[in-house]
């Protein structure tokens, strides 16, 4: 069975309105889901380092491909990062990723300000904290997702949503494919990357709704 963390939900969660429609209507709603990329980032953090990132004016999905550590969203309590942890965050949410040092734990971490790093051209960006092999490999996708005529799916989100997946869900494969599309810059790369991110969002909504109904 998939491991799940206790969700951190706002008082009016984005998925509450979705529960008031029939499964058939929900399927129709999701079929109208439109995803527009703002940016896609890869964060690589080695043991003993802290990577601090600013917010972006769009909701985001943080997905931990590999490694263990913790992430702070704004000034909220830390969220443990395990492989296949997925976190949806509101727009304009700064965050920091920390990886334990083998000698000193989470104290005396080397601080790296990701905003000072030279950004890659285009919508694909890479941020690195540490010189060795990364312990944490986190993919961050920032996007606008709307359904129906113009309703922003995560527009009213006020606090993070956390879900734990596993390798069988293949979300890492979808996000790695989205990264590869952006790197290739082939014709249609934007549409293909958005389509892959849409699949991730649909899987997330399916899990969230199932969790609330169980």
Image (spheres, rainbow, N blue to C red):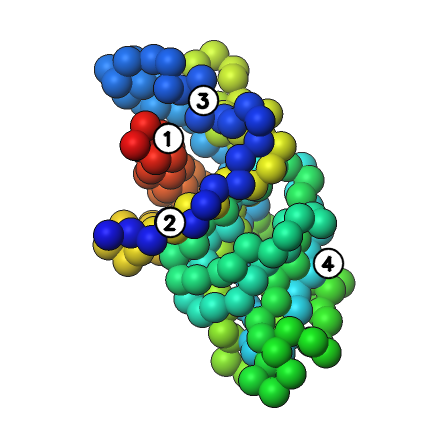
Give yes or no for contact between labels 3 and 1 (Cβ–Cβ under 8 Å): yes
Image quadrant assignment for residue 20: top left
Give yes or no for contact between labels 2 and 3 (Cβ–Cβ under 8 Å): no
Q: What's the distance in space between the residues labelled 2 and 3, CA to CA?
A: 19 Å
Q: Within 10 Å of the Cα at label 4, are there few (<14), some (14-19), or many (20+) other Cα atoms?
A: few
Report which residue position mark 4 lands on. Answer: 115
Residue 16's label in the rendered image is 3
Image quadrant assignment for residue 214: top left
Q: What's the distance in space between the residues labelled 4 and 2, CA to CA?
A: 32 Å
Q: Is residue 92 above or below residue 153?
A: below
First-in-chain label (4 vs 3): 3
Where disc 3 sits, the SS reads: loop
Image quadrant assignment for residue 24: top left
Q: What's the distance in space between the residues labelled 1 and 2, CA to CA?
A: 12 Å
First-in-chain label (4 vs 1): 4
Q: What's the distance in space between the residues labelled 4 and 3, CA to CA?
A: 35 Å
State the image coordinates of residue 200 (x, y, percent, origin top left).
37, 41
Identified at 60% across, 56% down, the residue is 78
112 or 69, which lies in front?
A: 69
State the image coordinates of residue 191 (x, y, percent, origin top left).
40, 37
Q: What's the distance in space between the residues labelled 3 and 1, CA to CA?
A: 9 Å
Report which residue position mark 1 lands on. Answer: 212
């Amino acid at each position: 069975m998939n491991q799940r963390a206790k969700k951190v939900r706002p008082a009016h969660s984005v998925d509450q309105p979705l529960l008031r429609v029939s499964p058939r209507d929900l399927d129709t709603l999701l079929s109208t889901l439109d995803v527009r990329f703002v940016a896609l980032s890869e964060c690589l953090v080695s043991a003993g380092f802290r990577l601090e990132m600013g917010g972006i004016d769009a909701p985001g999905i943080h997905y931990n491909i590999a490694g263990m550590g913790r992430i702070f969203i704004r000034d909220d309590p830390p969220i443990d990062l395990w492989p296949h942890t997925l976190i949806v965050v509101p727009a304009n949410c700064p965050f920091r990723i920390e990886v334990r040092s083998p000698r000193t734990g989470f104290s005396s971490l080397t601080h790296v300000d990701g905003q000072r790093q030279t950004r890659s051209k285009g919508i694909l960006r890479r941020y690195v904290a540490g010189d060795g092999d990364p312990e944490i490999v986190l993919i961050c996708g920032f996007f606008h997702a709307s359904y129906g005529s113009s309703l922003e799916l995560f527009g009213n989100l006020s606090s993070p949503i956390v879900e734990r997946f596993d390798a069988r869900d293949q979300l890492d494969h979808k996000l790695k494919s989205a990264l590869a599309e952006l790197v290739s810059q082939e014709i249609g790369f934007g549409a293909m990357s958005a389509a892959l991110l849409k699949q991730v969002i649909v899987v997330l909504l399916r899990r969230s709704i199932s969790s609330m109904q169980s």
